[in-house]
């Protein structure tokens, strides 16, 4: 069964050249240039092998090269399927147990390692890294920008929604995918910026050099005068029974597959985590035609923007606050999820368990900065700066501005090529990084005549696109702080709403509607934003309308559908609504309530397989027993259990081990942290001697 997305309301779905490959001896086709993992998942193949320790099924988890759960054999070599492009005629095999590797028939030829001296080395080609490179170039400072992907943009290339923040400072109101293209074009058109794509930083050395693996097979060393770390963040993991079953994904992996690779990686999805990442991923799933069964958040309310939460609710997705995941259920993959309510100590309330049929569970429980290179650079005396999530985890709009500031700081303080950043930049940066503020009541006009926007946004967040697009300047934010809730100033003889709908289309939270009483005061039209397939809605349809928080208001008739290029792929759907409901309508239900129905009885997973270390299959129970036995050194836990000894180098399990110490009420000052591996990712030793695919081994 093909899992490819054939149409999408925002993303182009283009015909691509196909290549042939074999999986376990079966001939299959893939799109040229896509990863092995994407090609397999497009054919609904989720099991990539079985772990040698206990035979457990292994599949994709991070899709970012950070773990090794997606390991396969490609033409006889073990590779990470999420990072390895598929090529014509490739023979791909699952790894069942430990693979037998081919023996070298003769010593390879070695070559000298290239070294490169650069003024500034930027690690990471996401929003922060690109913005910094652009600012440096404008100040006349050359830089080398490296990124481990084939395309620049970082997580921006996965974001189909419009961005919040300041329209003047960080392209707010523009979709993430388009911001990525804009910044990448600026970078690649600059003569002052050299770019190495598909290249991974391996280590920062004590002599001030940085080891880089170029294109996966050539090793080089870079000697920078300044190191700027813009490596982003990695996703936190979560402990629950069945947490490593194929079908349990990190949110970034899910968005990569859906929005980059155009793979519908799920039929029925359940989300754990109510921050912006989880809420946005749920919306992306709906746009890709995936049923979203529900979302569970352990806190009493979602931590993400209220407009994101409300948007998901009124699409028909139930949100279970003060709930957590108990288990992922299934044998060879996810078949259902069991969740339960938690008390004020976050302990499961027995008897509150319920289960839902699903084939995919998305984990979105927060991010940790990728700051290993930052610490190493400072330790070894390199002038080192950080930008974006590597400095402080925040929204991508904040990362863009953070990179701009760091670029200017480096240009002014190190190279004396420009003035320091203005004080106002720091003020803007703090606003963009701020968490959601107070939530009030919706400010809805008492007018019942003419035409005017209704702003269903009631939470203080940094966002101002609606104030910049109104041609009559009737949507305003009090003062200069864009975190204030916008309001409609009202119609007057001097300026009145012209029903252009630009505010409806431009709002990143889809939180503005347009109410028009001019044709029929008793049945006014309500124009709502719609970012789903044009073929899914027609004039004359009867649709279920909901208020801001997802309460069903009734049924309305679709009066008209407007598709204009100025609205950037957002349709404007006009509904005929009875006057008493008109100003309350905030959206249209997208999925049927039957999708979200729980199973008749809860499913109890009998196997206690909460896995701490995915690489070595070490359970929480094993480590908890050592802690209770008096072990306080994570290095000792590693030596005894092998936790942290696997391919990922402890990137996922170390934080979980610290959590176990916390749960066991161990004073953190008594715990010795583990020693980090010197290399950021695993690499063949021959690379350090210049033995790569490009070397002559004859």
Image (cartoon, helix red, strand yellow):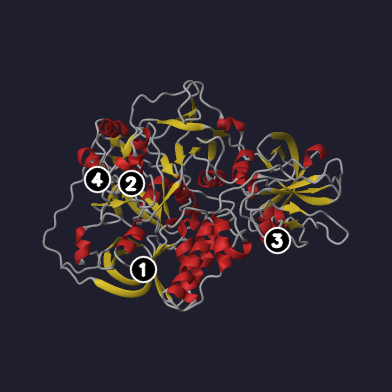
Q: Earlier in the sequence, mark 1 or mark 3?
A: 1
Q: Position of residue 403 (x, y in %)?
A: 48, 64
Question: Which element type, helix, strand or loop, lies under badge 3?
Answer: helix
- The reply to whether callout 1 and callout 3 are in contact (CB within 8 Å) is no
What is the CA distance from the residue labelled 3 to the residue labelled 4?
A: 54 Å
What is the CA distance from the residue labelled 1 to the residue labelled 2?
A: 37 Å
Q: Which mark is residue 469?
A: 3
What is the CA distance from the residue labelled 1 to the residue labelled 3?
A: 42 Å
The crowding category of the residue bearing disc 1, from other C-alpha atoms within 10 Å (few below 14, some 14 to 19, many at least 20), is some
Q: Which mark is residue 128?
A: none
Residue 54 visible somewhere in the drawing: yes
Q: Please tell me in which quadrant of the rendered image residue 192 appears.
A: bottom left
- The reply to whether callout 3 and callout 4 are in contact (CB within 8 Å) is no
Camera-side mark, 2 or 3: 3
Question: Which element type, helix, strand or loop, lies under badge 4?
Answer: loop
Camera-side mark, 4 or 2: 4
Q: Which residue is mark 4?
A: 645
Camera-side mark, 1 or 2: 1
Q: Which mark is residue 70?
A: 2
Question: Which element type, helix, strand or loop, lies under badge 2?
Answer: loop
Q: Earlier in the sequence, mark 2 or mark 3?
A: 2
Q: Which residue is mark 1?
A: 383
What is the CA distance from the residue labelled 4 to the residue labelled 1?
A: 31 Å
């Amino acid at each position: 069964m093909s899992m490819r997305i054939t149409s999408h309301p925002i993303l182009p779905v283009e015909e691509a050249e196909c290549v042939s490959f074999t999986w376990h001896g079966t001939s299959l086709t893939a799109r040229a240039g896509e990863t092995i993992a994407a090609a397999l998942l497009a054919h609904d193949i989720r099991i990539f092998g079985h772990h040698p320790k206990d035979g457990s099924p292994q599949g994709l988890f991070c899709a970012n090269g950070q773990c090794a759960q997606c390991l396969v054999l490609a033409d006889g070599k073990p590779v990470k399927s999420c990072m390895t492009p598929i090529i014509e005629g490739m023979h791909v095999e699952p790894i069942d147990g430990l693979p037998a590797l081919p023996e070298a028939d003769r010593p390879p030829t070695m070559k000298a390692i290239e070294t490169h001296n650069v003024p500034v080395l930027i690690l990471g080609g996401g929003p922060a890294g690109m913005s910094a490179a652009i600012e440096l170039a404008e100040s006349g400072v050359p830089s080398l920008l490296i990124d481990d992907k084939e395309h620049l943009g970082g997580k921006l290339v996965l974001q189909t929604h419009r961005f919040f923040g300041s329209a003047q400072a960080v392209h707010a109101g523009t979709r993430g995918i388009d911001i990525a293209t804009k910044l990448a074009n600026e970078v690649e058109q600059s003569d002052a910026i050299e770019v190495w794509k598909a290249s991974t930083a391996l280590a920062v050395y004590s002599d001030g050099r940085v080891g880089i693996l170029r294109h996966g097979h050539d090793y080089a060393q870079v000697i920078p005068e300044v190191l700027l770390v813009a490596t982003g963040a990695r996703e936190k993991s979560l402990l629950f029974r069945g947490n490593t079953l194929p079908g349990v994904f990190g949110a970034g992996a899910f968005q990569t597959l859906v929005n980059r690779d155009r793979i519908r990686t799920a039929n029925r999805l359940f989300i754990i985590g109510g921050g912006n990442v989880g809420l946005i991923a749920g919306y992306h799933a709906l746009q890709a035609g995936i049923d979203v069964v529900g979302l569970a958040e352990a806190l009493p309310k979602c931590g993400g923007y209220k407009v994101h939460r409300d948007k998901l609710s009124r699409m028909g997705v139930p949100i279970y606050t003060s709930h957590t995941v108990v288990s992922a259920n299934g044998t060879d993959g996810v078949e259902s999820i069991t969740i339960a309510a938690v008390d004020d100590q976050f302990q499961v309330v027995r008897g509150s368990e319920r289960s839902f049929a699903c084939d995919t569970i998305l984990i979105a429980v927060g991010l940790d900065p990728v700051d290993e290179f930052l610490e190493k650079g400072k330790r070894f005396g390199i002038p080192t700066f950080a930008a974006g999530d590597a400095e402080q985890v925040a929204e991508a709009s904040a990362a863009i501005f953070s990179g701009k500031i760091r670029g200017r700081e480096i240009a002014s303080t190190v190279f004396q090529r420009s003035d320091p950043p203005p004080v106002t930049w720091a003020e803007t940066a703090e606003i963009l990084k701020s968490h959601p503020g107070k939530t009030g009541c919706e400010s809805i006009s008492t007018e019942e005549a003419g035409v005017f926007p209704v702003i269903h946004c009631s939470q203080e967040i940094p966002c101002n696109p609606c104030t910049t697009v109104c041609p009559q300047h009737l949507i305003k934010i009090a003062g200069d702080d864009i975190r204030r809730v916008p309001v409609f100033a009202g119609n007057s003889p001097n300026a009145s709403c012209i029903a252009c709908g630009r505010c409806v289309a431009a709002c990143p939270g889809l939180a503005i509607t347009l109410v028009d009483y001019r044709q029929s005061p008793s049945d006014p039209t309500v124009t709502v934003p719609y970012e789903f397939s044009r073929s899914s809605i027609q004039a004359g349809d009867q649709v279920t309308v909901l208020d801001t928080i997802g309460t069903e208001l009734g049924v309305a008739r679709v009066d008209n559908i407007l598709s204009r290029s100025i609205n950037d792929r957002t349709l404007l759907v006009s509904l005929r609504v009875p006057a008493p409901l008109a100003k309350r309508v905030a959206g249209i239900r997208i999925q049927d309530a039957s999708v979200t129905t729980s199973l008749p009885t809860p499913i109890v997973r009998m196997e206690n397989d909460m896995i701490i270390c995915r690489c070595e299959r070490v359970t929480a129970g094993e480590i908890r027993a050592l802690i209770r036995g008096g072990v306080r050194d994570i290095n000792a836990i590693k030596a005894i259990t092998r936790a942290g000894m696997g391919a990922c180098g402890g990137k996922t399990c170390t934080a979980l081990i610290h959590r176990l110490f916390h749960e066991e009420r161990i004073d953190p000052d008594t715990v010795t942290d583990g020693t980090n591996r010197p290399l950021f990712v695993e690499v063949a030793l021959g690379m350090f001697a210049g033995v790569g695919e490009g070397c002559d081994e004859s």
